[in-house]
Image (tube, helix red, strand yellow):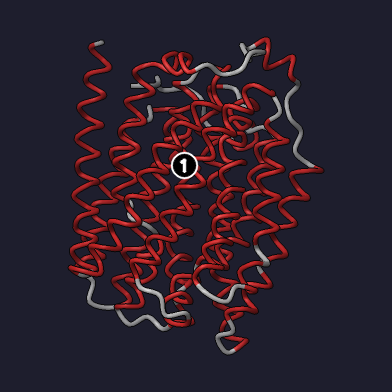
Amino acid sequence: MITKPSNSQGNLRAVPRGVWALGFVSLFMDVSSEMIHALLPVYLVAVLGTSVMTVGLIEGAAEATAQIVKVFSGALSDRLGRRKLLAVIGYGLGAVSKPLFPLAGGPGSIFAARFIDRIGKGIRGAPRDALVADLTPPPLRGAAFGLRQSLDTVGAFAGPLLAVALMALSGDDYRLVFWVAVVPAFVAVALLVFVVQEPGRDRRTAEGAPSEPLRFGDLARLGAAYWSLVAVYAVFTLARLTEALLVLRATSLGLAVALVPLVLVVMNIVYALSSYPAGALSDRFGRRGLLAAGLAVLAAADVILAFSSGPEAALLGAAAWGLHMGLTQGVFAALVADAAPTDRRGTAFGVFNLAGGLATLAAGIGAGLVWDRFGAPVTFLAGGALALLAAVMLHVLVRHSRHH
């Protein structure tokens, strides 16, 4: 399905400067977001008294909103040829949403803040990924997406570490942590505005960028290989459940509230360390094998989390969760860039993330219901079963694409 191995060594020095800059933009925004998200599930349940199903609904709806918005922002970036402008708007919305979290007085206010934050993420996501593809030559594409994902994930574990330190120093003052998280969000916006340079429109036009708006029939141009990838990604996203449930699982196994962000720290350290090597390896040896390995690791992580008997085992499960993310997320993005026509990259990333968004919403609500009715072990075993289903689909669709 999608790509041939590359002879590129994935040299970090060869990755374009703009990709590095976008990586640091992601890093700072993730520091901000994860300082909040690492504590938010526990804050909602323990402080505001909401149910786990409500947490799943908030998380699922928020993430689905982000993915759905990506369809429209991606198509708009194709039409306008102004990917950076849309990215600035998206990151700006994310930044201005951050003060709403410490000001929120109940689950409804938290939902509104998450909704605005995720709209911002949706606006920026597809144009940013298309911009990475625009900036990077094809032989370095896996390395470039892996590098951006690695830097993003450094922020994803630095944020929870800062949250742990601030909780310890402040006597578990959630709102103080939420206020401090505002600062790196605005640093990210400043970096994007003043450092990232977009390729000229003439260059993209020469590569096939459109001057006309997207038409529905153009979706057919994305091809069978692309749509096969979308189908696999949708089931994969269902299998991932939500990170909020990963955090709640750790607390149910006895991890102290002040140490809860360590779950995301462990997960994201492994995620950051594995993303770039996985992307570079996919350039050299092909991408499908990395995806299959990632699905196998996800299934193993779910089994660990289902049968954990203490917080140490939960941290091991979180590490395995991070490895599966590192083996799949940058590789999925590179596969989309490989499969999509140059003039429809923004649209391709948008539709891809729409499928993931709908699956995220279903996973958030479904996993919350299963947790409330049957408990955590059944929830994670169901996720493992879905990961194996995605692996079977990957095998079947890859064989189909080779023969057609």
Which of 119 and 335 lies nearest the eye of the viewer?
119
Residue at x 47% of width, y 34% of height: 333
Residue placed under numbered mark 1 in the picture: 277
Q: Which percent across, then down, holds residue 208?
A: 61, 11
Which of 352 and 198 lies nearest the eye of the viewer?
352
| Picture quadrant of residue 172 | bottom right
Q: Which percent across, then down, holds residue 228?
A: 32, 25
Vertical order, 100 against 335 (above or below): below
Residue at x 23% of width, y 38% of height: 391
Count the marks.
Answer: 1
Q: Which percent across, then down, holds residue 273?
A: 48, 52
| Picture quadrant of residue 306 | bottom left
Vertical order, 241 against 397 (above or below): below
For this view, does 274 lie left or right of residue 53?
A: right
Q: Which percent across, then down, holds residue 265?
A: 48, 66
- Mark 1 residue type: Pro
Vertical order, 302 against 294 (above or below): below
- Which quadrant holds the C terminus? top left
Which of 165 and 64 lies nearest the eye of the viewer?
64
| Picture quadrant of residue 183 | bottom right
Q: Going by the picture, which residue comes out furthest to the bottom?
A: 171
Q: What element does badge 1 sit on? A: helix
Residue at x 67% of width, y 13% of height: 211
- Which quadrant holds the N terminus? top left
Residue at x 62% of width, y 87% of height: 170
For this view, does 251 lie left or right of residue 32?
A: left
Local packing at callout 1 (Cα closer than 10 Å; few below 14, some 14-19, many 20+) is some
Q: Going by the picture, which residue comes out furthest to the front?
A: 108
Vertical order, 343 against 353 (above or below): above
Q: Going by the picture, which residue comes out furthest to the right?
A: 194
